[in-house]
Amino acid sequence: MKEPQIIVIGNGMVGYKFCEKLRSKSSSFNLIVFGEEPRRAYDRVHLSEYFNGKTAEDLSLSTENWYQEQNITLFLNNPVTKINRDLKKVYTANGLDYSYDILVFATGSGAFVPNIPGIEKEGVFVYRTIEDLDLISSYAKKAKTASVIGGGLLGLEAAKALIDLGIEKTSIIEFAPRLMPRQIDAAGSDMLKSKLADLGLQIHLNKNTTGIEGDGRITALKFSDDTALDVDMLVISAGIKPRDELAKACGIEVGPRGGIVVDEKMQTNDPAVFAIGECALYDGMIYGLIAPGYEMAEVLAANLCKGDKTFTGFDMSTKLKLIGIDVASFGDNFITEPDCRTIIFENKHKGIYKRINVSNDGQYLLGGILIGDATAYNLLLQTSNNKIVLPEDPAELILGARGGSESAGGAGITGLPDTALICSCEGVSKGDICSAVADVSCENIDDLKKCTKAGTGCGGCLPMVKDLMTHTLKSQGKYIKNVMCEHFNYSRQELFDLIHIHELKSYDEVLDALGKNDGCEVCKPLVSSLLASLWNEMILKKGNDVAQDSNDRFLANIQKGGSYSVVPRVPGGEITPDKLIVIGEVAKKYNLYTKITGGQRIDMFGAHLNDLPIIWEELIAAGFESGHAYGKGLRTVKSCVGSTWCRFGLHDSVSFAIRIEERYRGIRAPHKFKSAVSGCIRECAEAQSKDFGIIATEKGWNLYVCGNGGSKPQHALLLATDLDSETCIKYIDRFLMFYIRTADPLTRTATWLNKMEGGIDYLRNVIINDSLGMAAQWENEIENLIASYKCEWKEAVENPAIRKRFSHFVNAPEDKDPTIEFVEMRGQKRTAEWKTV
């Protein structure tokens, strides 16, 4: 009996996914695919990464041999141009004709190009395919200004691409009164607009483009408000239109505004013809995301294999990182009061906007919008979709519950029903993941991906997938071993103790005694950090460059453009006039950009690698020392002027801050940490936003721990009150050693506490009541670290072997990097923008 022949028109992401799903269920179909583009199906979701160095092959969804291995006939660069439904045949641009038993439209969508006079001019592009990106990249080399028409998802990605290509004057033109009008509200748009403006993008809202000026080549845009904008280049990203022209030509029903009409089985008005993806119109809607397209592919593949699945619509919640900025929306994101209760958190300084819409009875989450910080998106989406009862204070959903409390949203991930859709791209539920772990013994993420395909699409669900895996393993009574990497079968804490017990002093010693093979980029810097935390030796003393983070190798932060920063320590922010003069003289002599930081010291930028030792020689001679701005350790201890000058000051906060900074300088930890000392409750030093902060009281000092600023700000929590100076320092000693010994790599103190069972109460019991019986040992260990402190830069400039490293060219050590370019800015210099070629 002849196998049924299926022809798929279109080789995009959804067409490929249909083939993959069909072949996973059955090999009894003869499968033929016709693609319009000259390459195999590739990842359009991450198309912009093409400008960041990814190749077309990197973006490809399959290997070159995959179609052959799956017994699929693939024709590239050969689109179907005609269909005869009576004969059940397709005809292609290259003169081929094939018969079908089943025909599947997976033609996707094309860029919607508005009918603007002058749209045909040179320098006008669409942003849709790799070929489009190649054309844009080539033309950008001769353009100084550019615009993007469209402020939606793809428009913002296109604008980022133009910036990456070196076009500093890039603008976005949006017809609507806000950016991303289908995903975010006006307040969210304002926040996003502000963040984009910080990146140098000009945003023009409420703009209707009426004409494209230029004699054959674009020179300007004209708008309906009689204004104009000079541009050398234009990218159109104003939306999509379904590719339904072929279906329409052969009599398949299409919608009044486009799209191939399908039912819940993906069937058209012809029983032998189906449509999936962005070309399909279901219940009057085109689904312009990849996840619903994949679900359509699954529905059709299952039904062709005698299954019974239906497509009943799809959740259009989205989470994306646009131009490095988190943007997410979920559920009913635009519902307003009085139909709901709206809770909004806004931090303009950090560029964070969070809005959740809660039912009027406070029981359920209806939807929301996240800008700048979307870490809670997955759990919020699940809470909304599965109608999970909210905590007593729904604000915890966006502000977080501190100190070891149950995660916001009731029981968190463990409270989700088995039917909860965790990976929308592949349609993988919580039950599927837990079953794979429990019944198929998938005990790591790679095995879970292979078994369920969860996390193989956009990857946004992976944190939740990992949490479910861990929860399932724990519920089975299995020990979850958090190993560093394949070369060390130990957690960070275990390795810390073993290095200490065996008194290992170098990476090679650690690898020989405790590891295997040659190590990797994960374990090398981590082991170096542990060695530094344990022995507090000069980070470069061992001579193993590969084992250090890039900033540690040169005792400086490498900056944009390839130059380096110079940051001397200024304990407590106190500096003498003579030292200020030295900084000024050094900055002037070596033409460095200078800036006073929020941590009360002066950063100097733009130093050439060769100049670092001689710059530091001059600074050290004037009494300065390394500020460790490059290291995972203490950065700064900020202070107010305290009782020395302030009429509200209760204690000498400057002297105490200097004592604190000089005590803990140079100590290495899992993450950088910061401190501050405020002389009164007015908190001018912002101590409650630090990893540990101290605030004066009438009776002594209050000690706060585990706060941080940054992209995920958290207030520090009160550990102890009314301490004398010695007790305060004793508690800080214990706190830091407990943190250094137990925190995972690159985990800041706030995150460390958030994951700690028992939270601040447990931490207080350990630090103050010595419940683990470790206090004396920790106090002794930190005294050893303090006693062994040496300024790393002093050692570097005085050691000829280490000093020799600071040259850009081995064969010409005096020569500087000729590729570093600077431009003038407000009387100083800055690095020139990188230009992609």
Image (spheres, rainbow, N blue to C red):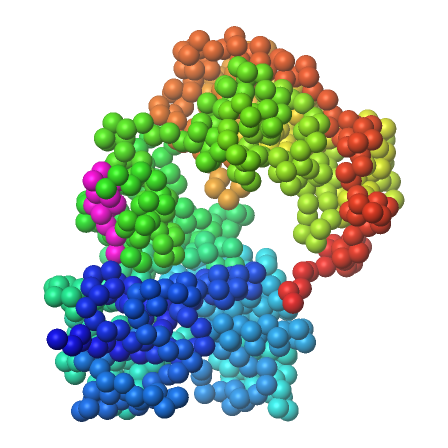
- In the rendered structure, does residue 115 fall within the stretch colored magenta? no
**Which residue does the image show at 55% across and 81% down from the upper left?**
124
In the image, is 499 to the left or to the right of 554?
left
Vertical placement of residue 559 versus 334, above or below: above
Relative horizontal placement of residue 565, taking residue 397 as reference (left or right):
right
Residue 438 is a magenta residue: yes
Horizontal and vertical percent position of residue 727 = 55, 11
The one nearer the camera, 186 or 121, is: 121
Q: Residue at x 62, y 87 (%)?
A: 217
Q: Residue at x 33, y 64 (%)?
A: 69
Give how far across and how far down residue 177 sits, in percent: 44, 70
Determine whether, in the image, residue 431 is placed left or right of residue 196.
Answer: left
Residue 781, how many percent across, how many down? 58, 13
Which residue is depicted at the point 68% across and 17% down? Answer: 788
Start-end of magenta stretch = 427-439
The relative height of residue 21 versus residue 590 in the rendered view (above or below) is below
* Relative horizontal placement of residue 804, taking residue 306 as reference (left or right): right
The location of residue 808, given as percent across then percent down, is 78, 47
Q: Residue furthest front?
A: 1
Q: How many marks?
A: 0
Q: Nearer the viewer, residue 71 or 154?
A: 71
Chief SS of the magenta region:
helix
Relative to 808, is 742 above or below? above
* Residue 10, image quadrant: bottom left
